Amino acid sequence: MTNEYTFISLYLFFGACFGFATYSKRHLFSEGPRKELDSEKTSLLEGRIFWVMVCTFLWPIMVITRINTAWVLFKRKKKAQK
């Protein structure tokens, strides 16, 4: 029983840490890369709390969307070099 609680606690703790660490780059975790200036304008506390809450529960999905964004940016850069 304790093992399940440990796993869930670690999952949530890692998600919260992930949210705090990626807050300044949250514009890269959308369905595609956006400009940083286009990201949502909210108060620092309100925006950070929401971002951390989302990442706490959905961090695996956020990692996958960031991989997709990195791939799209890579293809754009490669296309621009041609």
Image (spheres, rainbow, N blue to C red):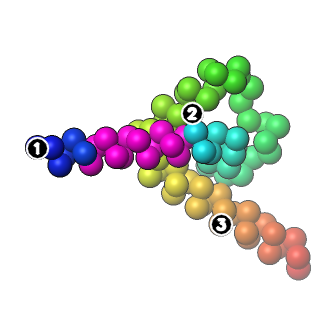
Per the image, label 3 sits on a secondary structure element best described as helix
x 73%, y 69%: residue: 74
User: Is 50 on the left or on the right of 81, as rendered?
Assistant: left
Q: Which residues are magenta?
A: 7-19
Q: CA distance from mark 3 to mark 1?
A: 40 Å
**Alpha carbon of mark 3 to alpha carbon of mark 2: how far?**
23 Å
Q: Is residue 69 above or below residue 14?
A: below
Q: Quadrant of the N terminus?
A: top left
* Residue 72: percent from left, percent from top: 69, 63
Report whether 14 appears left or right of 72: left
| Residue 56: % across, % down | 44, 38
Find numbered disc 1 in the image and state the secondary structure of the residue it sits on.
loop
Local packing at callout 1 (Cα closer than 10 Å; few below 14, some 14-19, many 20+) is few
Secondary structure type for disc 2: helix
Q: Which residue is mark 1?
A: 1
For the residue pair 65 and 10, the one nearer the viewer reads as 10
Q: Please identify, in this view, whether the residue under mark 3 or under mark 1 is nearer the observer.
A: 1
Residue where numbered disc 3 is placed: 71
Q: Quadrant of residue 5?
A: top left
| Discs 1/2, front | 1
Q: In the displayed structure, does residue 52 sit left or right of residue 8?
A: right
Residue type, mark 1 in image: Met
Query: How packed is label 2: few (under 14 Cα within 10 Å), some, or many (20 or more)?
Result: some
Residue 22: x and y in percent read 62, 45
- Please give the label number shown on residue 51: 2
